[in-house]
Image (spheres, rainbow, N blue to C red):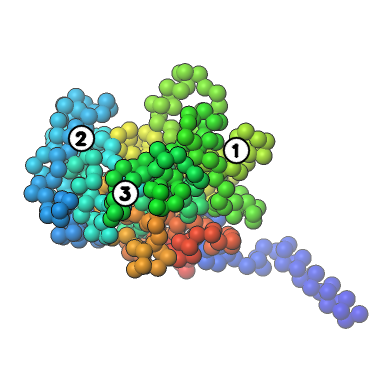
């Protein structure tokens, strides 16, 4: 009888607690974050965007470490010439007609004002930003071969001044919330690999690739020729921009990456029945059969399939029913992001990839359009039902070929925080949240993997099978939940 009465009492207590929310335990620590949204921009090093930000480890701290050297180790007398730096159709004719930037001192320089009319709205040419090239530029942490290995000459040493950026939304957010000045891109090189790294902390495997797809390096590991796949001595990995068999419903041409099967952060979330989504500008148009006019529209807006990492994985294979179901459930158009934020139906974990013209990539985007897009997303969140509990992580995929003076973690010196794949150079990262430390510059070493670790800790997920995942500092350290 006593046992029955005890059980009855326990049941009554449990019912009373559930019926009276005042008895429910309030969220603690990371549990206070109801939603994590990652906004993934493009191709800017930290020094390029925040090199003059007050109080940050910027260009003024580089000193002699910014001097660029020739192959024989001697410093350049002047930086290599940057040919046709502004020859893009979006620029006015007087900028397009600038043949070169030459005779520049061997040091970083402000791009804005380098010639009359050059501002943050000016489009600059693209710069090489491939895997082995980047590793060679970093030169074991000396960062003195950026100009030597760049196809854009002096432009690699360019940055934007405080005068040009102080009123930008990104700089205002960095001053209002938490700026991370020691956040490194997950892997060396370009967008394709770093987008894959964002979702799995891994590199895509390509078993038995054709010899013609292999990159080449010299006896010191420096770049000789960049191609899609790693050098033969480095394994079978797709390191540079490539297309997948699953992109564009299989209409991508030849030499396609096989479907990937490594576990992703999406898999880990789905295992725990936690909803998540990847939102991409132009997605709905990209995945359907299109007219010529619609193809031109996607080209004008610069939709990039290799910026859609989950679409490389077998789980989202559009040629079978299960894959289409997973794709429809988790891979969404950017227009849905605004609706979900406003309605309070944003999944607990979400990623947003703006379409090309809004992502700040040199060549096809300026700084200003993406800056406005960032501000729009922040306003939506601040006016949303999750205004008191969200975290927005604004970060960049990779350096875009631009110089940064801080040495990334290295194999051996930093244990498993570094490996063959990276990390690479610093990229700008801002944490915007009611729980972000206000007006703080966080000097903690992080890399792209730190975002995955934050998500994993928040939702008690099984770890991803990447040594880096276990070694890096979680981005949780950037928050203050005691206020």
Classify mark 1: residues with Cα within 10 Å, few (<14), some (14-19) or many (20+).
many
Q: Position of residue 284 (x, y in %)?
A: 53, 31
Disc 3 and disc 2: Cα gap in Å?
A: 28 Å
Viewer-closest of 466 and 211: 211
Where the N terminus falls, by quadrant?
bottom right
- Residue nearest the observer in this picture, 479 or 239: 239
Q: CA distance from mark 2 to mark 1?
A: 40 Å
Give the percent coordinates (x, y) of residue 208: 49, 44
Residue 217: give its label.
Answer: 3
For label 3, the crowd category at 10 Å Cα-Cα, with few meaning under 14, some 14 to 19 and many 20 or more, is some
Q: Residue at x 47, y 22 (%)?
A: 294
Left of 323 or right of it: where is 305?
left
Numbered disc 1: secondary structure: loop
Q: Is residue 303 above or below residue 405?
A: above
Q: Work out whether mark 3 precedes mark 2 in sequence or the reverse, and give the earlier one.
A: 2
Identify the element where label 3 is drawn.
strand
The x and y percentages for residue 414 are 37, 67
User: Of the residues under marks 1 and 3, which one precedes in the sequence?
Assistant: 3
Residue identified by numbered label 1: 317
The answer to whether residue 442 of the structure is visible from this angle is no
Label 1–label 3 contact, CB within 8 A: no
Q: Is residue 310 above or below residue 63?
A: above
Q: Which mark is residue 85?
A: 2
Q: Residue at x 50, y 59 (%)?
A: 466
């Amino acid at each position: 009888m006593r046992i029955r009465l005890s059980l009855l009492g326990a049941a009554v207590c449990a019912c009373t607690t559930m019926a009276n929310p005042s008895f429910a335990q309030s969220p603690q620590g990371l549990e206070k974050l109801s939603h994590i949204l990652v906004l993934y921009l493009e191709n800017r090093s930290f020094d390029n965007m925040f090199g003059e930000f007050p109080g940050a480890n910027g260009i003024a701290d580089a000193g002699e470490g910014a001097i660029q050297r020739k192959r024989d180790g001697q410093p350049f007398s002047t930086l290599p010439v940057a040919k046709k730096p502004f020859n893009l159709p979006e620029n006015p004719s007087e900028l397009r007609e600038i043949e070169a930037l030459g005779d520049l001192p061997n040091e970083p320089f402000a791009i804005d004002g380098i010639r009359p009319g050059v501002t943050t709205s000016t489009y600059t040419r693209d710069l090489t930003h491939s895997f082995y090239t980047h590793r060679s530029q970093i030169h074991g942490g000396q960062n003195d071969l950026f100009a030597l290995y760049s196809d854009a000459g002096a432009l690699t040493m360019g940055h934007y001044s405080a005068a040009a950026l102080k009123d930008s939304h990104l700089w205002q957010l960095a001053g209002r919330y938490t700026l991370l000045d020691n956040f490194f891109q997950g892997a060396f090189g370009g967008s394709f690999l770093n987008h894959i790294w964002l979702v799995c902390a891994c590199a895509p495997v390509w078993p038995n690739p054709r010899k013609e797809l292999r990159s080449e390096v010299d006896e010191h590991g420096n770049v000789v020729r960049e191609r899609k796949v790693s050098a033969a001595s480095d394994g079978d990995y797709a390191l540079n921009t490539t297309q997948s068999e699953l992109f564009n419903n299989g209409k991508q041409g030849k030499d396609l990456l096989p479907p990937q099967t490594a576990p992703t952060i999406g898999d880990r979330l789905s295992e725990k029945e936690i909803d998540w989504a990847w939102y991409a500008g132009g997605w709905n148009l990209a995945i359907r059969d299109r007219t010529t006019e619609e193809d031109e529209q996607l080209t004008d807006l610069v939709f990039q399939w290799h910026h859609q990492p989950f679409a490389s994985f077998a789980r989202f294979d559009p040629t079978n029913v299960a894959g289409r179901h997973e794709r429809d459930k988790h891979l969404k158009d950017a227009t849905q992001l605004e609706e979900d934020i406003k309605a309070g139906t944003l999944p607990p974990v979400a990623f947003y990839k703006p379409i090309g013209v809004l992502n700040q990539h040199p060549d096809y985007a300026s700084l200003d359009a993406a800056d406005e897009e960032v501000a729009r997303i922040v306003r939506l969140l601040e006016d949303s039902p999750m205004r008191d509990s969200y975290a927005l992580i604004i970060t960049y995929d990779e350096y875009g070929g631009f110089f940064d003076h801080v040495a990334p973690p290295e194999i051996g010196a930093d244990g498993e925080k570094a490996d063959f794949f990276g990390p690479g150079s610093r990229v700008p990262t801002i944490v915007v949240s009611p729980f972000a430390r206000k007006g703080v510059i966080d000097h903690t070493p992080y890399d792209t993997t730190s975002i995955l670790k934050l998500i994993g800790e928040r939702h008690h997920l099984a770890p991803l099978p990447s040594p880096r995942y276990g070694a890096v500092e979680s981005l949780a350290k950037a928050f203050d939940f005691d206020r």
